[in-house]
Image (spheres, helix red, strand yellow):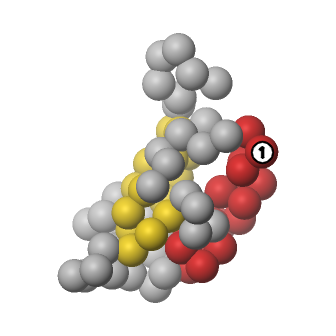
Amino acid sequence: MRIAADTTRCIGAGMCAFTSPEIFDQNEQDGTVVLLRPEPSDAQADTVRRAIRNCPSGALSLAAPTKGTT
């Protein structure tokens, strides 16, 4: 699993960081999403999916994993 974040679409609501603080943070200057772990572990998959669903701007999505990862 790999997370894609569109910072131009992000409105800085912070729901991702609230839902999954070990994966997401917010930029101190404008509040937009910062990916701490773009390729989270399988154990974090449910929390990541919840954070993506909770994103009010739709700035987060799942992308195909990079080659050599699961």
Lateral position of residue 30 relative to residue 16, left or right: left
SS at badge 1: helix
Residue 23 visible to the viewer: yes
Q: Determine which quarter of the picture holds residue 12.
A: bottom left
Question: Which of these two is toward me, 64 or 19?
Answer: 19
Count of picture labels: 1
Question: Which of these two is toward me, 65 or 44?
Answer: 44
**Quadrant containing the C terminus in the rendered view:** top right
The vertical placement of 31 against 66, above or below, is below
Name which residue lies at 53% across and 31% down.
Answer: 64
Name which residue lies at 43% across and 64% down.
Answer: 59
Label 1: how many Cα within 10 Å (few below 14, some 14–19, many 20+): few
Where does residue 42 sit, x and y in percent of width and height?
73, 39
Where does residue 50 sit, x and y in percent of width and height?
71, 64
Name which residue lies at 65% across and 57% down.
Answer: 48
Where does residue 18 sit, x and y in percent of width and height?
60, 79
Q: Determine which quarter of the picture holds residue 5.
A: bottom left
Residue 11 visible to the viewer: no
The vertical placement of 68 against 12, above or below, is above
Q: Label 1, on which residue?
A: 43
Where does residue 23 sit, x and y in percent of width and height?
55, 58
Question: Which of these two is toward me, 57 or 32?
Answer: 32
The vertical placement of 56 against 63, above or below, is below
**Quadrant containing the N terminus in the rendered view:** top right
Name which residue lies at 58% across and 61% down.
Answer: 22
Kind of residue indicated by mark 1: Ala
Lateral position of residue 6 relative to residue 57, left or right: left
The vertical placement of 63 against 51, above or below, is above
Q: Residue furthest top?
A: 68
Q: Residue furthest left?
A: 29
